Image (spheres, coloured by chain):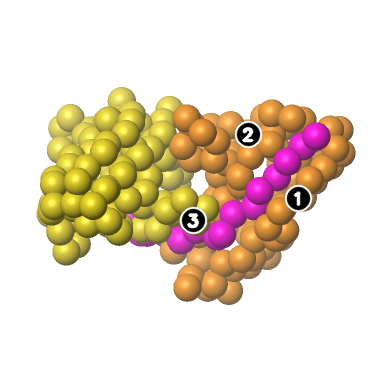
Amino acid sequence: DAGITQSPRHKVTETGTPVTLRCHQTENHRYMYWYRQDPGHGLRLIHYSYGVKDTDKGEVSDGYSVSRSKTEDFLLTLESATSSQTSVYFCAIRWTRGTEAFFGQGTRLTVV
Amino acid sequence: QQPVQSPQAVILREGEDAVINCSSSKALYSVHWYRQKHGEAPVFLMILLKGGEQKGHEKISASFNEKKQQSSLYLTASQLSYSGTYFCGTETPNTDKLIFGTGTRLQVFP
């Protein structure tokens, strides 16, 4: 195991409420990523981080924000959840460019 | 922009071979391959770096054509355990992004 955990594992929330998902790692990897997985779309990059307080947008970042105040934690926030954000969210970590990524077990988020 | 994978789905009998392709519109620094079982997280298979060699892992190997920005995953003498969804991931020079394709669902039957 790469020492990566996501919380919560499952969440049901109402439209319009803020939601924060947490990715925690114990491996001191520099890079952390948030993806969403939906049928027919594969894994789509939301945001990523290349160091503490260093983050950048991915391909589907609208409606999401992230923060990384320490190496081990990468938070994904849905400011005002919508039904279109119902998805499975995966966090991934890796040492540097050109190296393998390790994935967390995923968070299933349902927005009703 | 996501790399394009083909085919979208493959159905095999045990012992048959399969090829999964991944194509990008951008110049690539590396190509990754992952397999995901139903309800689980994706798991790393191999990575091919620009200028690197073709990789292999048991009966699964891959190639990387840098000029065409394409990679292929070869599954030889498939086993039941090969079933799952395969994703290619791509990196481009001068970026830290890791972008995945839409996936290829592989089913192996006895």
- Which is more toward the observer, A51 or A93? A93
Q: Amino acid at mark 3?
A: Ala
Asked if residue A111 shows in the view, the reply is yes
Residue that appears at 50% across and 56% down: B40
Q: Which type of secondary structure does the marked residue at label 1 adopt?
A: strand
* Chain of the residue under label 3: B
Q: Residues within 10 Å of mark 3 (few under 14, many from 20)?
A: some
Q: Is residue B8 magenta?
A: no
**Position above or below: B13 against B58:** above
Q: Which type of secondary structure does the marked residue at label 3 adopt?
A: loop
Residue that appears at 15% across and 38% down: B65
- Disc number at residue A11? 1
At which x and y percent is residue B28? 28, 38
Chain that is coloured yellow in the picture: B
* Left or right position of A13 against A40: right
* Left or right position of B21 against B85: left
At which x and y percent is residue B56? 16, 59
The answer for how far apart the CA atoms under marks 1 and 2 are is 20 Å
Res A57 → quadrant: top right
Residue that appears at 69% across and 28% down: A84
Q: Residues within 10 Å of mark 2 (few under 14, many from 20)?
A: some
Question: Mark 3 touching mark 1, by CB under 8 A?
Answer: no
The quarter of the image holding the N terminus of chain B is top left
Tell me the magenta residue range. Answer: A96-112
The answer for how far apart the CA atoms under marks 2 and 3 are is 21 Å
* Left or right position of B3 against A22: left
Asked if residue A32 shows in the view, the reply is no
Chain A colour as displayed: orange
Q: Is residue A101 magenta?
A: yes
Report the residue marked by disc 2.
A61
Q: Are the residues flagged by discs 1 and 2 from a single subunit?
A: yes
